[in-house]
Image (cartoon, rainbow, N blue to C red):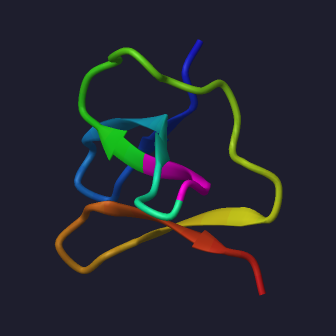
Amino acid sequence: MAYQFKNSKGTTYFLHAKRRTTSTGKQQVLYFFAKTVKEGAIDALPKGYVVSEATSGLPLLKRAA
């Protein structure tokens, strides 16, 4: 089951991760939320991250302080 977040407006978002290689050859992981479960959905928050909500209601993944 993919990690899900319900915003203050009642919309449910699912967390996804996508790996990519930068132009310098480094591996980078991109995290994003989507309204539907797609390829790359992950089950839990990455260690050291928290979810916050923008004023528009979109969920944001931030590093924990």
* Quadrant assignment, res 35: top left
Of 51 and 25, nearer the camera is 25
**Relative to 16, residue 30 above or below:** below
Residue occupying the point 46% across, 43% down? 20
Secondary structure predominantly adopted by residues drawn in magenta: strand
Quadrant of the snapshot with the C terminus: bottom right
Of 28 and 3, nearer the camera is 28
Name the spot of residue 61 as percent of width and height, x first.
Answer: 52, 63
Residue occupying the point 24% across, 80% down? 55
Residue occupying the point 25% across, 41% down? 11
Name the spot of residue 24 as percent of width and height, x first.
Answer: 50, 64
> In the shown orientation, is residue 38 left or right of residue 5?
left
Name the spot of residue 37 as percent of width and height, x first.
Answer: 35, 18
* Quadrant assignment, res 60: bottom left
> In the shown orientation, is residue 49 left or right of residue 22?
right
**Relative to 14, residue 55 above or below:** below
> In the shown orientation, is residue 49 left or right of residue 16?
right
Name the spot of residue 57 as percent of width and height, x first.
Answer: 24, 65
Residue 20 colored magenta?
no
Give the residues drawn in magenta, as a range: 25-31
**Residue at the farthest left position:** 56
**Relative to 60, residue 47 above or below:** above
